[in-house]
Amino acid sequence: MKNVKKSSEKNVRRKPISKAVLCSVCTAMLVSTCGNSIVLANQIKNPKRVVENQSFGNKKEPLGSLADLAIKEESETVDKAGDGEPILTTPSFLKATDVESYSVERISAKYTMAELAQMPYDQMIDIVCNLDSFRQITDLFVYNDGNQAFYGDKQRVQALIDNIKSKAPTYTSTDNKGIPTLIEVLRSGYYLGFYNPGLSYLKTREEKSKVIPAIKALQANSNFRFGTSKNDEMVAAVGSLIWNSATDVEVINNCIPIVRDFVDNFDIHSLDNAKGTAFYNIIGSIEYDISSYKYEGSTDYTKSQWYGKIDNYIEQVIRVANLGPSKLNSNTAWIINNGIYMMGTLGKVHSDPKRCHQVLTDCLSLYEYLGEQYFEVINVLSYNYDSKDVNGNLLDKDKIIEAGKQKYLPKKYSFDNGSVQFQTGDKVTEEKVQRLYWALKEVKSQLFRVIGRDNPLEQGNADDVLTVVIYNSPKEYKFNKIFNNLSVDNGGMYIEGDGTFYTYERTIEESYLSLEELFRHELTHYLQGRYMVPGMWGSGALYENGRLNWYEEGGAELFAGSTRYDGVKVRKTMIGTLRVDPSARWSLSKTLNATYDSGWDMYNYAWAFQNYLYENRKDLYDELISKIMNNDVAGYDALRSKWSNDSALNAEYQKHMQKLVDNYNSYDVPMVSDAYLATIQERDLNGIVQELNSVANLSNGVTTTQKSHFDNAFTFRGTYVGEKSQGKLTDQAAMDKVVNNNLKTLDTHSWNGFKTLTAYYVNHRVDNNGNFVFDVVYTGKLPKNIVVEQPIAPVAKIVAPSSAKVNTNIEFKGDSSTDDKGITSYAWNFGDGTTSTEVNPTHSFAKPGKFTVTLTVKDTEGLENTITQVVTVTQDATNGITSEVEPNNNYADANGPIFAGTQVSGEFAKSNDNDYYYFEVKEEGPVEIKVTTSGMTPDDMNWIVYAENDLNNLYAWKQDSTGNSAVGTFNAKPGKYYLVNYNWDKSGSYTIDITGKVGDGTVTPENQAPTAVIVAPTTANVGESVSFNGAQSSDADGTIVGYSWNFGDGSTSTQVNPSHSFSSAGIYDVSLTVTDDKGLTDTLTHTIEVKDTQVPGTNVEVEPNNSESQANGPIKLGELISGSLDTLSEDYTDKFYFEVSKKTTLNFTIQSEGTEYTWNITDEDGNSVAYPKGEGKDEFTVNPGKYYVTIYTWGNKNIDYTFKIDNNQGGVDEADKKAAEGVINKINALPDRITLEDKKDVEEA
């Protein structure tokens, strides 16, 4: 798999982490609910310390915390490029400089989750509500024993939910009552449950749906709206809670006023960061929940709870997608992008399947061709609608992308005979490109001096050519997501597997670091991977557990300060983090053991230590580098351990940091000289080399020239024999002094080309006379008069079959390779560990698989050319395959076929590995897959199945872990299927066993029990006919032959979808037992609350009625209604509803002895139609429909009230007043809570 190194202001290679200090230079948007910031979840990978147990394959991750999930404009490393699936667009309006208070160091920690887990529920909740910030809980969103204890207590989690619900009516536009912090603590549990088996109960929809009543209670508060900073914060908090829990139709429709308000006031709200945050969280959370449906057992959205029931919400989001060019600018692009993006998901649940498809088609002409929004539409159409518009016209995505590349990356430059390539935007100046090229020479020269070699560890890799892609701006850099399927929430990224570095030009306002400084850092990573660290980035034991994080990042920061002859200088930009109280600085032990999880300060402290070694202890630095280059993991670990416990070394480290701080103002940032850009005086090459060597004094000199886009270059390489050797390090110091003095001397010569020379020395050795010897290399710029023809490399050609059988001899011919000067050598690598230097070798393969055969030919000038050919080796699979053969990391290389009854062995050789297999189902029926692990647990891996004809949607997945096995059963139709096994942090081996009618084998799986599913309402009225649906029950390996219902009132039924009415009020547990054709059963219980019938109208409140789904009614117009808000029982809100059949003008009157209450009336869409106007009576006009009356208090006193809705023009008459007084007196004589039993007494009043 590809390894991607992202970079930016810090220029660091890193994996995404769960806990990170917010760097002062990050420029990407954060999405969260606290402090008006945002946290993006679906672009954040799982932290290494979290054990991922993602049973639904590549389901998008839930929302993490601010500190955990801050998307940095920093460099990070991911394991592969993106898969092309559209993603939410990250808003970019929050800079780190705007949110400095989010730095973890700026928040004083108070509690751990372990401490909170030991507290009584009430005390814990009280403490959380009174925290200044959720980050005062040190380990929120981090899986550990404390979090396991906290969230493993289901009653504690329920207490959080209940308290959010009870507090919901109390928040105001000036005080959120600590609810956002409670929400952070609650949703942290769902986040951790998504990844960790110990809390896996929290990732089920059933468990997450328990939060829905609390969400509705929050939405029922009239302050759930845009307004003050507290209003906006609460809307954002509700969005983040929805993101990590669940929705239903009512929850989504309750958000219609939020989306409508944002669009109605778009010009104002789009400039408000807090409102943008809240808007993002609301629309993002709803899309996340709906898109998760496909991972929960069904891809048929017509059967989902939302289908056809949230059209009004979708129409509001359509307004976002259709805002158009007049509303498009740098502040609003992310909003419009997300409106377009959501058409893909929301289109699946709109009652009109073509509605959103039509919107996308219209957007193709609405937005600029090849603009950001145009590509967003193309991507959504590609992923959701097979690249077709609503009229069925096919859109050639590849052709459109190529046109985009030509538009945004039109300039191309080649250097050093094609070994360095630049592709840039038209606004990236040629001068900038030249400066970066010569910066490359300076960094290479200083790094090669330190490591003592300049030959790559491996030949024939993609990084034989370094490609640098530079977009014009951060805005245009976003197209890299479309062009290369790579994340763009960063300042750049280097992909080692492709040898390509992507970044963008930036202004001083966009970054205090220049493009050159960033390039130097990232170039060092390129050199580390090519010349220093064996293997691909992230692979091998050296990379495990973050061993090299501190070294690679500190080294990249170090060598970014490379110069021509002043060594590697201190960069002033690195010292800022060290300018703190000395007692707060990192110890050496902390630095040496730091990983990306340690936060952004690692780069500065790791740089400071390597700067100390470079300047003061070359012996230790050489020892460290030797361990790494020799792949000596044990020696490297022992060295770190030794240094970590060396108090004297730590003291020197601390002293060095203080020296850096004390001399802060004396440092600068090294950049290339203007001398590189000067026109070089004409002269002949021989004269240049002779004059150079008159100073350099090299023997066996060889001169080569390099063709480049601007000015060509030359390289003079020879042997330098020094004085008696005093040991490698002393010899290096002497050689360094000689080379630097030579460069300085040549600077004084009249030919100005010498000012472009860089130099290095490698391959230390001692001759027979005891003198030290080095190979020394000088490189510089040539004048225009010297014509350099780019040398023509030989052409390698392989003639061989592309397929063969195991243990069958294959003739490989290389004699068709050509070169005008003659080929001197042939080097074959057969991809199975064997090689040959023959021109036409014969070879056989001992096992099946796809083998990449490589031939490298070299000519008389030393130029090489390499070609590869894949040979597919098979065996007679009469019983199916029995073992994995790499590579099998994608569909094209999938191993197979797997036959039922034939066990297949495989191995995860590294973390984050993927193994692809295929099998064919001959007849429809049940299939069971069992993957048994060794050296790891089944919770350290997952398996998923895709049908060949639908690779975008999961067909089946791991359902359970039994012992050491990950198992699952599903019903499969005839056809070809792909099985994908993948792991996370741990490597190990496994076996695959499939039962069913698969391949040429047939093994009948053990019968699996059916699954009972009940679809029914949760509330009903006495005597009402209630429909119970059991048709969605299923049996993976057979059919359901029996349905047995028990309604909890003595009644039963054997129908699939019976109807039943309850004769009395109460709470009933309705159970359904289904039986399959093999006699196995499954039982599910559903609870329904039956209320007394309120027809033709209700005149007394019945609890609970705190949400629209629980609203009392219908109330009878003209009839006096009585109720009570009992704050002692946390009853702050009462809801009622009424219906009108024609346009009507009504009056609302209310009477109470209390004063701390108010009311409002809304329609079904949440639009306000009436509220207090302070006139004693309130008149309003309504159209036919259903309306809700909400009465709520913000105080702490009980409120007894009566109200009436009628269509007369008068107020409350004397008779009504007397009746009201009687009711209130009666209520006062009743218990604290009016119940159904009390209702009769109240009605008598």
Image (tube, rainbow, N blue to C red):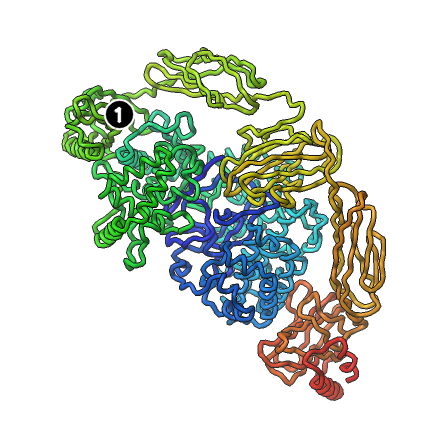
Residue 536 % position (x, y): 43, 34
The three-letter code of the residue at mark 1 reads Thr
- Residue drawn at x 62%, y 27% as measured from the top left: 881
Query: What is the crowding at mark 1: few (fewer than 14 residues within 10 Å), some, or many (at least 20)?
Result: many
Residue 235, can we see it?
yes
Q: Is residue 347 left or right of residue 770?
A: right
Q: Residue at x 70, y 65 (%)?
A: 1109
Comparing 661 with 934, the one in front is 934
Q: Which image quadrant is residue 1198 in?
A: bottom right
Rendered position, 501 above or below 345: above
Q: Nearer the viewer, residue 1058 or 382?
A: 1058
Indicate the secondary structure of the residue bearing disc 1.
Answer: strand
Please state the horizontal and vertical placement of residue 772, each as a whole percent of the image: 19, 27
Report whether 1055 appears left or right of 170: right
User: Considering depth in this image, is 1 or 901 the residue closer to the camera?
Assistant: 901
Residue on which the image places disc 1: 715
Q: Is residue 1145 above or below residue 358?
A: below
